[in-house]
Amino acid sequence: MSDDPFATPRAKNGRAPDARRVGGWLPMREYPETEPVDFVIVGTGAGGGTLTGRLAELGFSVVAFDAGPWFRPLEEFASDETEQNKLYWNDRRVTGGENPLIMGGNNSGKAVGGSTVHYAMVSLRFRPEWFKSRSRLGYAVDWPLDWREMWDYYAQAEQALKIAGPVSYPWGPKRPRYPYRAHELNAPAELLARGAEALGYRWSPTPLATVSAPHGLSPPCVYRGFCRFGCSTNAKQSQLVTFIPRAVEAGAEIRDLAMVGRIETGNDGLVTGVHYFREGRWGFQAARNVIVAGYAIETPRLLLLSANDRYPDGLANSSGLVGRNLMTQSNQAVWGLMEQEVRWNKGPPSLALTEHWNYEDRKDFPGYYCWMSQGPLPVEWANTLIGSRGLWGERLRQQMAHYNHQVGLKMVGEMLPDEANRVELDDKEVDQYGLPVSRITYRWGEDDKRLINHALDQMQMSLEAINATDIFRQDNDTNHLAGTARMGFDARSSVVDADCRSWDIPNLWICDGSVFPTTGGVNPSLTITAIALRTADRIAALAARGELARRHRSVTVGAGHALAG
Amino acid sequence: MTDRFPGYDVLSKRHSPSWNEVTRQVVNRRLAVPREPRYFTWDEFVTLDAICDRIVPQPDHRPKVPLAAYVDARLVEGPGDGYRFANLPEAADAWRQGLAALDAEAQAAHGVPFHRISPHAQDRLLTQAQNGELNNPAWGGMPARMFFEHRVLPDIVHSYYAHPTAWSEIGFGGPASPRGYVRMQLDRRDPWEAAEAYPGHEDRARRQNRHV
Ligand SMILES: Cc1cc2nc3c(=O)[nH]c(=O)nc-3n(C[C@H](O)[C@H](O)[C@H](O)COP(=O)(O)OP(=O)(O)OC[C@H]3O[C@@H](n4cnc5c(N)ncnc54)[C@H](O)[C@@H]3O)c2cc1C
Ligand code: SF4
């Protein structure tokens, strides 16, 4: 059997890799293709991985698919930025518009565990008002979820991922203590703190999904700083080492290197299963329900690829909103030089943050943002210098020689939904599976630009306050994706309801970053995980009432309000 | 450029607890990159090599990082970028076209191909590409600025800073697993990190760097 996780699938013959052990295996239940399982789940990341675990634990039969390989980090993750490109979704996509989005490693993963395998582990809650940004804050749209209910699911997500955070968090309503103590500050975090204090803002150690003390088979974080390129010690509590083993142990089957290319519907208009490509052939898995969790590009792509005579515009798309309202987050930064040695590559990249401007409404633009300390590795840092300063030649090498003295602050900012920002199918190009690739169009709005400029000014003041020199702004970066299958209150203005169930087809669900109606000013994963935990509970409740395959009449318009209240 | 981290060599740590087996294999493969082009023709490769020398000029006193070879290798072996800009061709096509265009620009301005014009003239052409000031028909509609920003700079510069020689040059700790770091505060150095030479204390840095 091949040792290469890309060559042949590993989850086969009644067993699956145990990512927590060197050479480890777990016994895995397998389901026949022809007998419908309760749930097929497409994608195993923050949304799909969580749901696979929870639905299996709730007693449903589940087969999850991921197009990517099933890694064992302990023996397969190198301390190397370039090699670890293997974690990303590197298949073809076309990106355009006024402000084209950079994809690849900048935006999405392709592996069992999804993008959580390479994410930076920052685990933040939304500010409560963001679930009602239209009615409470006067911009964009409301979510059909209630923040009080989300507060409980956030707590569950934080427990499941053993988030390490401060004893008391400075912003927002009370929350329970984080399961693990906060990590110590590294030098860039200390510098963020000093800058914030000089401006009179509160700051905090960042709640992170990497353990600060041993947990199960995970050792505490060793501060190697390669988190965004995969954690080779398994200190990181990605879905790969948390919900995925839970799923397998609870009886789910997960198929790696399995690309779903099409969702099938039957004569009654309900979905019947998925066509998927694995080991050189297309197979069909029958299912009573399908949950799409491929993230904000692949999810709409799959729904559009599944168009048929009955649904000529794609599945779940009677609103025309599948693929629309794509959002990213502004990820601009300000960089400077310190006299001291900072050595910013040590430790997770964002050990401190300030959410000051997430909780401050006195400003002249809609939307919110926070900023974090930074520690880019050499290729990433060089990429910043060429991208935002256009440096090359001797000037580049000289600037790079200051690597150990650099400091920086990076924002995570809310960008507003705009129907013109979207994912479509390209009419010419196809990928290695023969499927039309995504064509992504993006443009920053005027409000987005105002927010970015505000943040850049603020971060610059913070660096000036600690006497950084040679300060410059990186004004071109974005990261994280959301939207393209938004949740809402009715079938006309949204794709799914509060339970992540599509309005058009009652046994088709979408549960990942694409259901976000707005993005808020914090990183998205904890919210995705919390929504997935909630969805699992809602599915169990609906199943108990016999309402899985059919939408109960009272649960239509306004359902979100009723459920959340 | 002065030697800021005298005697520091990331590779001397390759058998220390900072390197795991998979990292050793990855870096070995990188150091053994084939030096002959597999995608480009030799003529194209010579042009590419000349561009690499201007984008990342390298000192004479140490073996050169074969940047053109890395650009070529990635086009053959992948992985891809995961996207392409709507107004740029796929990486391999963009490179082929861009190299031809830079040669055509050099021919038009100086009567010889790019690698034969002076380093100064090469820099001038590359700067014009960066500013979007080139539009010889050989570009075939591909915007020179986009090619420079999104192919020339990243493909060459990423290759350089992925190389242990560059890590040593900038004092980067390099691979760090299973052993990570312990001293996280400002102005603190773990004994297995590069020591910086401060004026008058170069010898001490050199001594420390022998024991990383
Ligand atoms: C560099 C980087 C750093 C980040 N850091 C943070 C952070 O610190 N904090 C934070 O909150 N967020 C962070 N994020 C964002 C976070 O990783 C994502 O928002 C989150 O993982 C998205 O979850 P998801 O379930 O929607 O999709 P993903 O986690 O991306 O999972 C989708 C999965 O679906 C699979 N898939 C897609 N289509 C198909 C198909 N047709 N068939 C089979 N499989 C398919 C993919 O292979 C993938 O594994 C970061 C992202 C990046 C790129
Ligand atoms: S710093 Fe911690 S979380 Fe990040 S890769 Fe290292 S051990 Fe993993």
Image: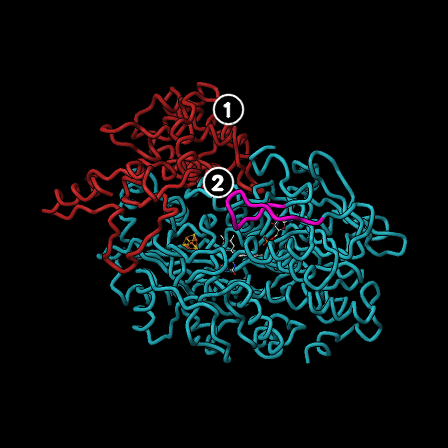
Chain colours: A cyan, B red
Q: Quadrant of ligand 2?
A: bottom left
Total numbered circles: 2
Label 1 beta carbon within 8 A of ligand 1: no
| Residue at 73%, 53% in the rendered image | A40
Pinpoint residue B99: horizontal percent, then vertical percent. 46, 27
Which label was assigned to residue B39?
1
Residue type, numbered disc 1: Tyr
Res A420 visible: no
Task: Tell me the chief SS of the magenta region.
Answer: loop
Label 2 beta carbon within 8 A of ligand 1: no
Q: Nearer the viewer, mark 1 or mark 2?
A: 1
The picture quadrant where one finds residue A391 is top left
Res A483 visible: yes
Pinpoint residue A413: horizontal percent, then vertical percent. 49, 64
**CA neighbours of label 2 inside 10 A, class few (<14), some (14 to 19), many (20+):** some
Residue type, numbered disc 2: Met
